[in-house]
Image (cartoon, rainbow, N blue to C red):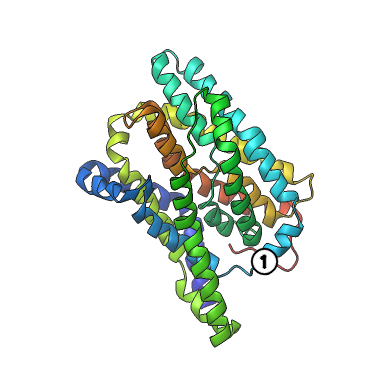
Amino acid sequence: MNEKKENVMGLWEKYLTLWVALCMAAGILIGYGFPGMANFIDSLSIQQVNMPIGILLFLMIYPIMIQIDFKQVVEAVKAPKPVLTTLVVNWGIKPFTMTFFAWLFMTQIWAPFITPEMGAEYTAGMILLGIAPCTAMVFVWSYLSGGNMGHTLVMVAINSLTMLVLYAPLGNLLLGVAMPIPLVTLALTVGVYVGVPLVVGYLTRKILIQRKGMEWFEKVYIKAWGSVSQIALLVTLVALFMLQGEVIIRQPMVIVMIAIPLIIQTFFIFGLAYLACRPLGIVYEDAAPTSQIGASNHFEVAIAVALTLYGTGSGAALATVVGVLIEVPIMLALVRFCLRTRDWFPREPEKAPIM
C-alpha cells in the first residue's frame, strides 16, 4: 500500500505541470464551447460564493482537516512569531507593493495600449486583490508543502478577523473611495470554505478515533480518502478556467497584461516572507504557510467589492477574475519550490513532510 501511494504521489509531482496545463486548457475549451454550462455553474452562487466551487473546496480541505491534531493549534498560539510575520507582510507590505506594481504596469508600461480609464479600473481591481489575503486555499498549499496545519488554522482565523478591521480603511486609503465591507460574502466564504470542513473534520476525527482507535483511523479512514484533495484541486482548476473560458478567448492580451503584474506581485510577496523566515529562525513547517497565505488571495471578497463599486463589466471586476485564474497554477509552482528548498530552514524533528 505504501509503495502504491508513493507511486501515485510520484506521478503527481513528476507530471504536475502537465496536469495543470491540461486542466487549464480543458477548462478554457469547455467554457468557450459550452458557455451555457459555464453560465449555469456561475449562477449557483450566493453573494459571489460559488456553491459548486465550495463543494470542491470541501473535498480538498476535509481530508486535510481530519489529519489535524488540534494540539498543534495550541502550540501555534504559544509561538506567535510566524503569525506576526504573516500579519506584517499581509497588511503592512502587500497592499502597498500591489499598488506600486498596478501603478507601474497600468499607467506606465501598458499605457500605450490601454486608455487611462481602463488602466484606472484594472489598477483598482488589483488593489482589491492586494488587500484580501487568502483564508481557505492556503490549507491546500500548506498541506501539499508539508506545513504545520495547526499554525495554518491559527493564521486563517487571525487573518479573517484582521480583514474585518483593515480591509475598508486600506481600501479607502489606496483607492480613495468609500469601501464597503462585504460581510455576507466574507462570512459565507469563511463559513462554507473553512468552517464546515473544519467542524466536520474535527467531529469525524474525534468520533472515529474514540470508536475505532487511532490505528484504524490512520490506516483505513485517512487512506480511504487517498488522493481526493489532489483530484478535487485539478477539477477546481478546470471549473475556474471554464467559468472564464469565453473571456480568455475573446480578450487574451488584456488577460496577459493584468496577469503579468499579478504574477510578479505573487512571487515578490512570497519571496519576501519566505526569506524573512530564515533569519527569524522559523522552522520550515511554519515558514511555508506563513509565505503562502499572503501570496494567495481571498478573491470572492475582491470580486464582490469590485462588482459593487465598479459594475459587472468593469475592468476592476475583470482584474479580480484574472487573480482567480493565476492563483492555482502559480501557487502549485510555489508549493514545489517550498518542497525543494525545505532544507534551507530548521525542521520540526518529530514531523516528517507530507510530500
- Above or below, 122 relative to 159: above
Q: State the quadrant of the C terminus.
A: bottom right
**Image quadrant assignment for residue 213:** bottom right
**Image quadrant assignment for residue 321:** top left
**Image quadrant assignment for residue 111:** top left
- Above or below, 259 relative to 195: above
Secondary element at image label 1: loop
Front-most of residues 309 and 117: 309
Query: x and y percent of residue 106 in the render?
Result: 47, 20
Query: x and y percent of residue 147 in the render?
Result: 63, 58
Front-most of residues 139 and 228: 139
155 horizontally vs 343: left or right:
left
269 horizontally vs 330: left or right:
right
- Above or below, 17 relative to 319: below
Instruction: Note whether residue 113 is visible.
Output: no
Instruction: Note whether residue 131 is visible.
Output: yes
Q: How many marks?
A: 1
Front-most of residues 175 and 347: 175
Which residue occupies 63% across, 50% down?
A: 158
Query: x and y percent of residue 287 in the render?
Result: 68, 50
Residue on which the image places disc 1: 352
The amino acid at mark 1 is Ala
Q: For the residue carrying disc 1, how many other residues have a C-alpha within 10 Å: few (<14), some (14-19), or many (20+)?
A: few
Which residue occupies 48% across, 50% down?
A: 187
Query: x and y percent of residue 215 in the render?
Result: 59, 83
236 horizontally vs 66: left or right:
left
